Amino acid sequence: MEEKNILSFIKTVSNMPLVKIDKHKYLVNTFASEYPSLLQNILEKGAYDAGVPLNIIDKKSKEAINYEIGKSTAVSFVSGLPGGIIGIGTVPADAAQFFAHALRIAQKLCYISGLPSFTLGDSMTDDEACLAAVYIGVMFEDKNATIALNTIWKAIAEKSARICFTATSIVGHAVISSILKTIGIKIGSKSFMKSVSKAVPLIGGAVSAGFTYASLKKMSYRLYDKIKESKYSIS
């Protein structure tokens, strides 16, 4: 798939019902009862820089992942949407379903950690889709995505990522292009598509949860671990 099609795919998936997570509501629900005095800083800077204990950040991040993994065997984001994914050529709805769960997990981990997140839905720009691609790329063990993650954390440390942040300007177009290529290869992989097609809950179909649970959980913990490692390395 071409870069523009990958970006279009990410933007289309982001616009599916239930994929968007409200940052303010999520962080309030997650931290307000235990850390009311830190809540404003958590909302502005993330839990790490707000001073939330590391063991609590670890607990909340893992709870977020496990909650979404549990939903991955029961919730269909593509219900009622046109088949054949929704305007993105030959990418089927079950791949969109899988990526919808990945985007939800990435959002929560971004919100907790203080990483730049992305506006989901109709307002998502190409640059925000590139940012989402970085996080998905880390899930897929793409080396350039991990480098990009490190670069983003460094930019945050220098106070430049929270003001007028753009993924392409901070990470670089060549790196983003490489990450998008990796995602395109994954989406086009017969083994990936065959496994996903057997795993996601679609309307009227039987669900085999093994691949979704095992693979999505592994990918999600990989993203969390890299977020944590990268944050520590520049702290």
Image (cartoon, rainbow, N blue to C red):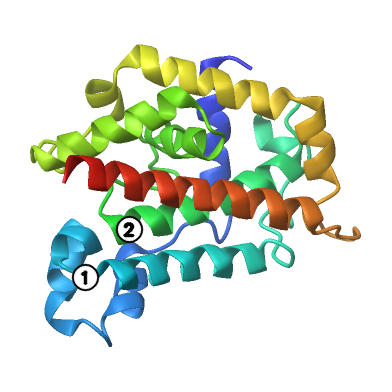
Residue plotted at (32% across, 73% down): 56
x, y percent for residue 57: 33, 67
> Is 93 located above or below residue 41 in the figure?
above
Q: Badge 2 is on which residue?
A: 111
x, y percent for residue 177: 44, 16
Res. 165 in view: yes
Residue plotted at (71% across, 40% down): 95
Q: Residues within 10 Å of mark 1 (few under 14, many from 20)?
A: some
- Residue 205 falls left or right of residue 98: right
Q: Amino acid at mark 2?
A: Tyr
Residue plotted at (76% across, 34% down): 192
How far apart are the alpha carbons under marks 2 and 1? Answer: 13 Å
Q: Amino acid at mark 1?
A: Val
- Residue 150 falls left or right of residue 179: left
Contact check, label 2 and label 1, Cβ < 8 Å: no
Q: Badge 1 is on which residue?
A: 52
Residue 93: quarter of image: top right
* Helix, strand or loop under label 2: helix
For marks 2 and 1, the one nearer the N-term is: 1
Residue 213: quarter of image: bottom right
- Residue 33 falls left or right of residue 69: left
